[in-house]
Amino acid sequence: MPTAAPIPSQILKKYSDSVKHSANLVPEAALPNPAPFDTQDAIGTDLAFTGDYAVAGNYEGFTVYDISDPAKAKIVSQTYCPGPQNDVTISGDLLFLSVDAPMADDKCGSRTAEAAEGWEGIRIFDLSDKAAPKYVAAVPTPCGSHTATLVPGPADAALLYVSSAPSRAATTECTAHKGRIAVVKVPLADPKSAEIAATPMLMDDGGTPLERLSYGGCHDITVFAARKLAAASCIGDGLLLDIADPLKPKVLDRVQDDKHFGYWHSAVFTRNGDRVVFSDEFGGGRSIVCDPKAGSFGGNGIYEIAGGKLKPLGYFKIPRPQLEPKTCSAHNGSLIPVTGRDVMVQGWYEGGVSVIDFTDPAQAREIAYFQREKAPVEIGGSWSAYYYNGHIYSSDLVAGLDILRLTGVPLEPAKPGQLNAQTQG
């Protein structure tokens, strides 16, 4: 069970209540993390959605929420299963947890291992009973799993692109995996037989190194299924991939931008896949870079996709006058279905939640926001902010789940189903 002490409740309440927001982004619900997810170790991470449920990852496990009535959302279950970062991916009734730090073993009672040879990879859960998720199996992956992206594949199996961030760059395993991703195949009828199906090479030079990192592995990959494309954010590089054969992705283009990007992190496609927004997580959320006063890193680059090439069209950073310098940079976001416009929502750590209209890429602008004051621990704010079924859901690293309603834009009808933000189209 948790080894860290709980954050004092009065401190958590003060932080949770310190909300500021634009008039058109209305808070409808806030669900704090109850024990055992109320310690400094319990960092809230990514979100995924299925039907009337949201699942939030956490360094200490994951939480399932009933969001059938967003204003009255409630916790259905919490599963204690430490494994940084525990980013979540859903396929049918299967839930995948990405573990990107060496653990003593693959079981849920395990804690971080001292030795670099510990287990890391993907844990698999049966989510058919939301009140009682069941641990099914685990797949070790080279250098761990930072994020797992669901990729279109055979009808009888889930395919996952596994990205490995360079947290163990000095190990033999990570060195051998430079420039590669892992493709994990999970048979839906027998998830216990899940295995690595391929380890394709994307960058045979290992990737463009950054000043503080000699390893250039991919951080996140976003798929646009309809055009069989993927955008891979690979630390020092932005890649455009052809995934017509998902086991053998081909690099169509590879770009760098040492003026604006210090850590290529994630990507969001437009609805027809003709543009993509790459985000820069310079400093890993611990730098003060998210507003224009703080230099040129930590924002979004908007690219056109034409002829298999990426062409820069514009750049965005939060222009909010009331945004005081704090630990923030661009992080996870998703597209919002707005008629006739390109609009996305995004988490920016302590920069909060930003809704961005990038219909004109050269003049991208913030049209709504939600934020809290500086977190009472080392880092806080919005890890992920995604639009799902009529509402915006934000996973706060400290405060838990926020549910927001956007007004004043022509939103298209809600389409419930499943959402993994890294799988579009």
Image: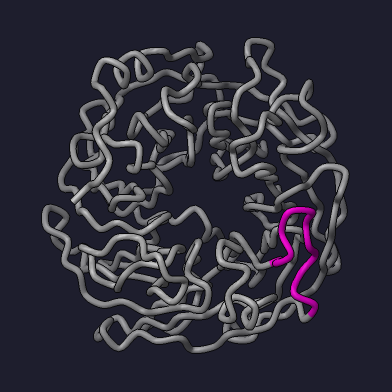
Specify the quadrant of the image occupied by residue 178: bottom right
* Residue 184 coordinates in the image, percent (x, y): 45, 80
Res. 222 in view:
no
Give whichever of 414, 16 is nearer the camera: 16
Main secondary structure of the magenta stretch: loop
User: For this view, does 258 lie left or right of residue 251?
Assistant: right
Give whichever of 288, 125 is nearer the camera: 288
Is residue 150 placed above or below 186 in the rendered structure?
above
Q: Residue at x 68, y 59 (%)?
A: 233
In the rendered image, the quadrant that contains the C terminus is bottom right
Colour scheme shown:
one colour
User: For this view, does 255 lie left or right of residue 162?
Assistant: right
Q: Residue at x 30, y 24 (%)?
A: 29
Res. 261 in view:
yes
Q: Residue at x 48, y 30 (%)?
A: 381
Is residue 265 placed above or below 247 in the rendered structure?
above
Span shown in magenta: 205-216
* Residue 71 coordinates in the image, percent (x, y): 26, 26
Q: Residue at x 64, y 86 (%)?
A: 248
Specify the quadrant of the image occupied by residue 6: top left
Specify the quadrant of the image occupied by residue 211: bottom right
Query: Is 199 in the magenta?
Result: no
Is residue 419 placed above or below 281 in the rendered structure?
below
Give whichever of 368, 160 is nearer the camera: 160
User: For this view, does 250 lie left or right of residue 372?
Assistant: right
In the rendered image, the residue lying farthest to the front is 114
* Residue 227 coordinates in the image, percent (x, y): 66, 68
